Image (cartoon, rainbow, N blue to C red):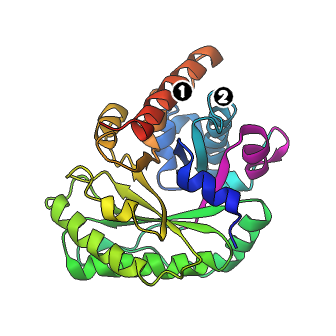
């Protein structure tokens, strides 16, 4: 059973979720954005050491606290690392007032029927047990929708909700993320099909459980209102999806009940070469802007 205080923070506290979960395939891009080129490191271990240092710098900044950040989504290797001598999930909860959430998917299968399903996760139960023991309160998993194909979108939603049930069995809150690509030639049509399919599956969620939804900001403002208002949904959060922070924040502010869960948009101004003062000021500006878009609607 999920702790009531956790559900309260995730479902109703003002703020947003920081996505710090770039994994193997996206890590080089995250480091490039941070100003660290591929020739600055050799091998996967050194790459992950550098990105872990970047994440520690973010998490330790004065502005990165529960005052404006509800939770942080972590990559598995980040969850297993240390911050200030403590396991990262413990550090986030005790020192920063931020709930730890774990990215659990292992990447995407090749596209079929206009979508990319998640790869199989045969070790998910053992990962969830380990995450729970470290104080993680929820999970996130991502699929991608490129076309308005009803068969493909139904398959994505069914897979997401089936795995969410397995996650809920471990007392964790699942964040379901069927990302509609902002480059989709029929984005609005894909969103309409996806919303219908999510509503269909929400009716099957047991009454004592809630899920969260992480969705691309819709083409039509407030299109996800029925999901925001559903009693099985703890929160609807928005991914930045390739939009700049300015554009993502502008679009998010038009959508009632949606808060941010930005990754690239959160850290787009941060550089390894910055002094601590410069870094902290840039991150504080980003957090303030995203918090405003998540809490003040136009």
Please state the horizontal and vertical placement of residue 149, each as a whole percent of the image. 19, 75
In this view, the residue farthest toward the right is: 85
> At x 21% / y 53%, what residue is drawn?
183
Q: What residue did someone put label 2 on?
A: 61
Identify which residue, 296 or 22, lies in the foreground: 296
Please state the horizontal and vertical placement of residue 238, each as a whole percent of the image. 40, 51
> At x 62% / y 51%, what residue is drawn?
9
Identify which residue, 8 or 132, lies in the foreground: 8
Give the residues in magenta: 84-104
Q: For residue 92: magenta?
A: yes
- Alpha carbon of mark 1 to alpha carbon of mark 2: how far? 8 Å
The answer to whether residue 23 shows anywhere in this view is no
User: In the structure shown, which secondary structural element does the residue marked by tag 1 occupy?
Assistant: helix
Q: Which mark is residue 283?
A: 1
User: In the structure shown, which secondary structural element does the residue marked by tag 2 occupy?
Assistant: loop
Q: Which mark is residue 90?
A: none
Q: Is residue 147 left or right of residue 103?
A: left
Quarter containing the C terminus = top left
| Label 1 Cα neighbours within 10 Å, binned few <14 / some 14-19 / many ≥20 | many
The answer to whether residue 161 shows anywhere in this view is yes
Q: For residue 117: magenta?
A: no
Q: Is residue 66 left or right of residue 283?
A: right
Q: CB atoms at circles 1 and 2 under 8 Å apart?
A: yes
């Amino acid at each position: 059973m999920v702790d009531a205080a956790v559900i309260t923070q995730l479902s109703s506290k003002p703020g947003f979720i920081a996505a710090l979960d770039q994994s193997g395939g996206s890590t080089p891009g995250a480091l490039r954005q941070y100003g660290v080129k591929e020739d600055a490191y050799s091998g996967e271990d050194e790459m992950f050491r550098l990105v872990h240092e970047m994440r520690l710098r973010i998490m330790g900044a004065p502005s990165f606290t529960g005052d404006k950040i509800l939770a942080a989504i972590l990559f598995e290797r980040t969850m297993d690392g240390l911050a200030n001598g403590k396991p990262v999930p413990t550090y986030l909860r005790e020192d920063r007032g931020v709930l730890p959430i774990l990215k659990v998917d292992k990447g995407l299968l090749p596209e079929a029927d206009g979508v990319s399903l998640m790869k199989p996760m045969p070790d998910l139960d053992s990962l969830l047990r380990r995450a729970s023991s470290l104080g993680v309160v929820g999970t996130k998993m991502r699929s991608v929708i490129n076309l308005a194909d009803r068969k493909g979108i139904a398959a994505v939603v069914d897979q997401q909700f089936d795995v969410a049930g397995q996650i809920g069995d471990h007392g964790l809150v699942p964040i379901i993320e069927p990302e509609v690509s902002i480059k989709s030639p029929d984005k609005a049509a894909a969103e309409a099909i996806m919303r219908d399919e999510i509503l269909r599956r929400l009716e099957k969620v047991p009454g004592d459980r809630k899920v969260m939804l992480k969705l691309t900001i819709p083409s039509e403002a407030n299109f996800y209102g029925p999901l925001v208002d559903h009693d099985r949904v703890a929160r609807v959060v928005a991914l930045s999806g390739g939009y700049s922070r300015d554009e993502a924040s502008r679009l998010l502010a038009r959508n009632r009940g949606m808060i941010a869960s930005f990754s690239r948009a959160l850290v787009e101004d941060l550089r390894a070469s910055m002094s601590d003062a410069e870094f902290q000021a840039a991150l504080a500006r980003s957090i303030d802007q995203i918090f405003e878009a998540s809490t003040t609607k136009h």
